[in-house]
Amino acid sequence: MDKFKNKDGKSVLLKMVKSIQENKDYLGEVDGLIGDGDHGMNMNKGFTVFEKRFKDKDISFTEGLSELGMILLNEIGGSMGPIYGTIFMDMADAGEDLEEIGTGELKDMLEAGLSGLYEIVEAKAGDKTLVDTLAPAVSALQQAKDDGKDVVSALEEMKKAARAGRDSTKDMVAKFGRSSRLGERSKGVLDAGATSCCFILEAMADGICEL
């Protein structure tokens, strides 16, 4: 598959929702080790609100990302709502006029989300945040685009990069959020945001490949 149709992307969004729902307890456990433990609950709340509102409506991939982003930005607690809201809404803005989405277009969308994130947080790769998952995923898609890989192959590379990025946070010292107060004691635990980002990217990739 070289590209997928934007209008067919609702099932991808619902797969992302299901991944968060299925992993909400695990995300809470990860967050509870060095944070306040509410990441899974808050993410599940936002994604489930999206599912209830749009599961029976005809909505495209980019329209859905925009709606999901607005829900996360405006209707859930914690610091991650504005972060994920910004990522999804900027992704949607970058792809809203696309009828078909291939490796390059998806890279551009995720890159726009990452750029939007950089505008609201100072975190960079190595700071034990979701940037450590998202930035390598964008780089993997860029490399796949440069290598001329189709969407399916590119998404496999993206998933590998996202997982490696998530796992790398275990040995990092947190620089932001509640966990940053622990200093060196924040080592040895995955970052919750990096973990949820990996779940979301994996689900997005799997959903696209099933189209």
Image (cartoon, rainbow, N blue to C red):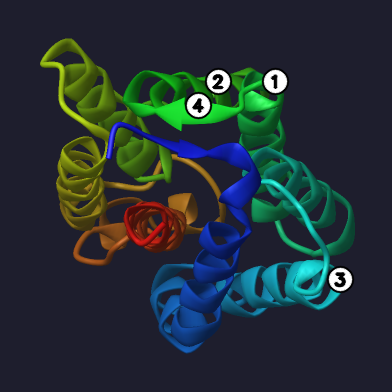
On residue 53, which mark appears? 3
Task: Please give the name of the residue rendered at 17% of the width and 47% of the height, measured from the top-left corner.
Answer: 156
Q: Which residue is denoted by mark 2 in the rendering?
A: 112
Neighbor class of circle 3 (other Cα within 10 Å; few <14, some 14-19, many 20+) is few
Looking at the image, tell me whether mark 1 or mark 2 is earlier in sequence order: 1
Pick the front one: 84 or 89? 89
Pick the front one: 142 or 191? 142
Spot occupied by residue 47 in the image (x, y as percentages of width and height): 68, 69
Determine the image quadrant of residue 138. Answer: top left
**What's under tag 3, amino acid-wise?**
Arg
Dot 2 and dot 4 residues touching (CB under 8 Å): yes
Q: Is residue 29 above or below residue 119?
A: below
On residue 11, which mark appears? none
Task: Please give the name of the residue rendered at 50% of the width and 26% of the height, measured from the top-left corner.
Answer: 114
Q: CA distance from mark 1 to mark 2?
A: 14 Å
Dot 3 and dot 4 residues touching (CB under 8 Å): no
Looking at the image, tell me whether mark 4 or mark 1 is earlier in sequence order: 1
Spot occupied by residue 83 in the image (x, y as percentages of width and height): 65, 42
Dot 3 and dot 2 residues touching (CB under 8 Å): no
Neighbor class of circle 2 (other Cα within 10 Å; few <14, some 14-19, many 20+) is many
- Answer left or right for 112 relative to 45: left
Neighbor class of circle 1 (other Cα within 10 Å; few <14, some 14-19, many 20+) is few
Q: CA distance from mark 3 to mark 4?
A: 26 Å
Q: Which residue is denoted by mark 1 in the rendering?
A: 97
**What's under tag 1, amino acid-wise?**
Asp
User: SS for tag 1?
Assistant: loop
Q: Which residue is denoted by mark 4 in the rendering?
A: 114
Neighbor class of circle 4 (other Cα within 10 Å; few <14, some 14-19, many 20+) is many
